[in-house]
Image (cartoon, grey):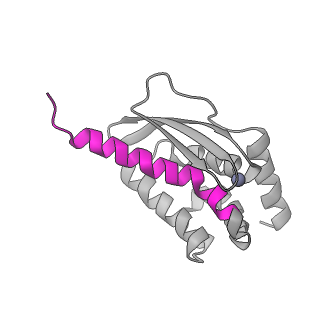
Amino acid sequence: MTDDLYRELILDHFRNPRNKGALANPDVKVQGTNLLCGDNIELTFLVRGGKIEDIKMDSTGCSISQSSASMMTQALKGKSLTESAALTAAFKKMLLENGSADNLPEDLEELASLEGVRKYPVRVKCALLSWNTFLQGLKDFEAKADAPKK
Ligand code: ZN
């Protein structure tokens, strides 16, 4: 895809965010903030049978943070917790370690549109906010699952 198509894709997710809102009875509810830019996100998700059965995000902030959050919910829905963690790692690697979009699963080519963000270090935090928030949510979920039941 060309840079123009990528830009279009990012704007499309910004203008028409997917999975926007909050789930009524989520297993996990987690918030994240990027003080540098003023981006905020709240994620809610449901875990059933080791999979992300449903996920919603409510975000405010710049176009990069919001489109990244929108793409993320699409990418994670239906994935197992293990796959989700691996995908998050691949995405972070693409932006933080000069990894390439080639390491992303093929069905998630949309996420590659954010690869260009790497050129703008300040924006990297925007693109990663939703993913780091999701990782925190996974941690919370695992801690809850490991806690002794009464
Ligand atoms: Zn931002």
Q: Which residues are magenta?
A: 123-150
Picture residue at 64% right of the left edge, 33% below the top = 20
Q: Position of residue 2 (x, y in %)?
A: 81, 67
Return the residue nearer the eye: 8 or 97. 97
Q: Is the magenta region chiefly helix, strand or loop?
A: helix
Q: Nearer the viewer, residue 88 or 148?
A: 148
Compared with 145, 68 (above or below) is below
Can residue 80 be seen from the camera position used here?
A: no
Q: Is residue 47 above or below residue 107?
A: above
**Which residue is at a point 82% across and 66% down the rendered structure image?**
3
Q: Residue furthest right?
A: 4
Q: Which residue is drawn at the image coordinates 69% and 48% (left, top)?
A: 38
Q: Which residue occupies the extreme top position in the image?
A: 24
In the picture, which quadrant includes the C terminus?
Answer: top left
Q: Is residue 96 magenta?
A: no
**Residue 140 vertical placement versus 2 (above, below):** above
Viewer-closest of 80 and 19: 19
